[in-house]
Amino acid sequence: MLAYTVIGSNNKAKALEFYDALVAELGGERGFATDRLQFYSNGQGGMLGVGTPSNEEQATFGNGTMPAFACGSPEQVDAVYNKAISLGATCEGAPGERLPGMFYGAYFRDHDGNKLCAAHFIPQ
């Protein structure tokens, strides 16, 4: 349903280093870019953009805003979460089952404070 989402950063170079490695865990890679944004895609739909705000003001994270990365298994959730933590992300909820029998996920924040989720919906 979503075409893309953009995450703001105050240190684009550091953010791209983080997201290059994290997105690779999801089978994605860099796509097109502009002078302020780098987009990532795994070729299966929506894209993730990372960069500086267009109004040239400080990037801030949104309270209640949380992009989620679709994972194909609980093991991929674990791998994405572990990669994020190894890249300097902070834990916001270790991998585990949420909504018993429906959802397995993990939560973390990047170096700019953006909250992210690695999510796997358990087939019913």
Image: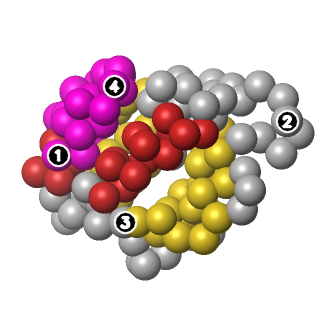
Instruction: Check disc 1 and report the residue beneath it.
Output: 79
Mark 2 crowd level (few <14, some 14–19, many ≥20, 10 Å Cα): few
Cα separation between marks 3 and 2: 28 Å
- Amino acid under label 1? Ala
Instruction: Check disc 3 and report the residue beneath it.
Output: 28
Which percent across, then down, holds residue 75?
A: 11, 51
Earlier-in-chain disc, 1 versus 3: 3
Cα separation between marks 1 and 3: 14 Å
Could you say which quadrant of the image residue 5 lies in?
A: bottom right
Instruction: Check disc 2 and report the residue beneath it.
Output: 56
- Amino acid under label 3? Gly
Q: Nearer the viewer, mark 1 or mark 3?
A: 3
Q: Mark 3 touching mark 2, by CB under 8 A?
A: no
Task: Name the one closer to the observer, 12 or 45.
Answer: 12
Q: Nearer the viewer, mark 1 or mark 4?
A: 4
Report whether residue 74 is seen.
Answer: no
- The boundaries of the magenta stretch are 79-106
**Mark number for residue 88?**
4
Circle 2 sits in a helix, a strand or a loop, which is it? loop
Q: Mark 1 touching mark 3, by CB under 8 A?
A: no
Q: Residue at x 33, y 49 (%)?
A: 21
Could you say which quadrant of the image residue 17 lies in?
A: top left
